[in-house]
Image: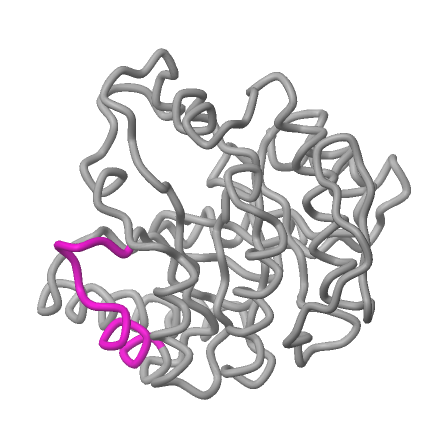
Amino acid sequence: MKFGIATFVDDDSIDPASLARAIEERGFTSLIVAEHSHIPVSRESPYPDGGDLPPWYYNTLDPFVTLAAAAAVTSTIELVTGVALLIQRDPIHAAKESASIDLISGGRFVFGVGAGWNLEEMRDHGTDPKTRGARLDESIEAVKALWTDEPAEYHGKYINFESSYCRPKPVRKPHPPIYIGGNSDATVKRVIRHGAGWISNPLPRDVLAKRIGQMHDGGAQDVPLMMFGTPMKPDYWRAAEDLGFGQLGLFLPSVGKDESLRLLDDFAAKVQEYQATTG
């Protein structure tokens, strides 16, 4: 099992280039970054983990800009959106941005996508929350078409464009890996429909097992599994590995450079201990 670093890169934390270098130098597999375009002051949407919304949600850098900066100073780590809120983005721009990162990184981009939970945020982008699932499905299909077809076209209820040229194309063929976030029956169906991986939150083991079982029952026996925000608990890592997770994104708080580097040193030491005991 591989270990990456999952975080909210914001305007108060370690800068993307320093963070990416530090992750690669310590032998981690990936940098996985979250996205929120903005946080409306008035919210009817409760924070999914309960309580007040953590401050880093308000300050998050754009994930594609962050990963482009990381790509420029690294050579091995994967660059993962965890997750890009695709229903709030124009899919043509999303296809070009993601393919551009894949190109400049030599094929290291991984496209984690989701619909999100903040209803006010998505409404400000012109997305009706009631349509977010269908819009996400169409957006994924449209991005895949733009990545792989030349020229490409897509005709759906929410996403529609005529035959067009869109370059660059991604380096990785047929296209970068796609992981879908969420924890619902609809998420399971979406993972199966698109032949995608699942990027989960650090849910209880029984919830993870339930969702993976549903995917298997739906005919998806080899779904790639990744996690955003995994706690520093080796027993939990072992349980996730037993369930088939191929990569865990350990949660790095959004803190300054010195504290981030200290935490990454601690994380790397604990991962080494874990790998030594598990073979």
Residue farthest along the top direction in this orientation: 44
Q: Nearer the viewer, residue 55 or 119?
A: 119
User: Percent position (x, y) of residue 144?
Assistant: 75, 58
**Quadrant position of residue 53:** top left
User: Percent position (x, y) of residue 247?
Assistant: 55, 61
Label tally: 0
Magenta range: 9-23
User: Percent position (x, y) of residue 148?
Assistant: 79, 68
Q: Look at 65% across and 22% down and name the residue there.
A: 131
Q: Look at 62% across and 16% down and name the residue there.
A: 130
User: Percent position (x, y) of residue 150?
Assistant: 81, 71
Q: Look at 66% across and 74% down and name the residue there.
A: 167
Residue 236 placement, left or right of 233:
right
Q: Is residue 51 above or below residue 158?
A: above
Q: Look at 34% across and 85% down and name the residue there.
A: 73
Residue 197 placement, left or right of 98:
right
Q: Is residue 61 above or below residue 41?
A: below
Q: Nearer the viewer, residue 185 or 135?
A: 135
Q: Is residue 21 magenta?
A: yes
Q: Is residue 137 magenta?
A: no
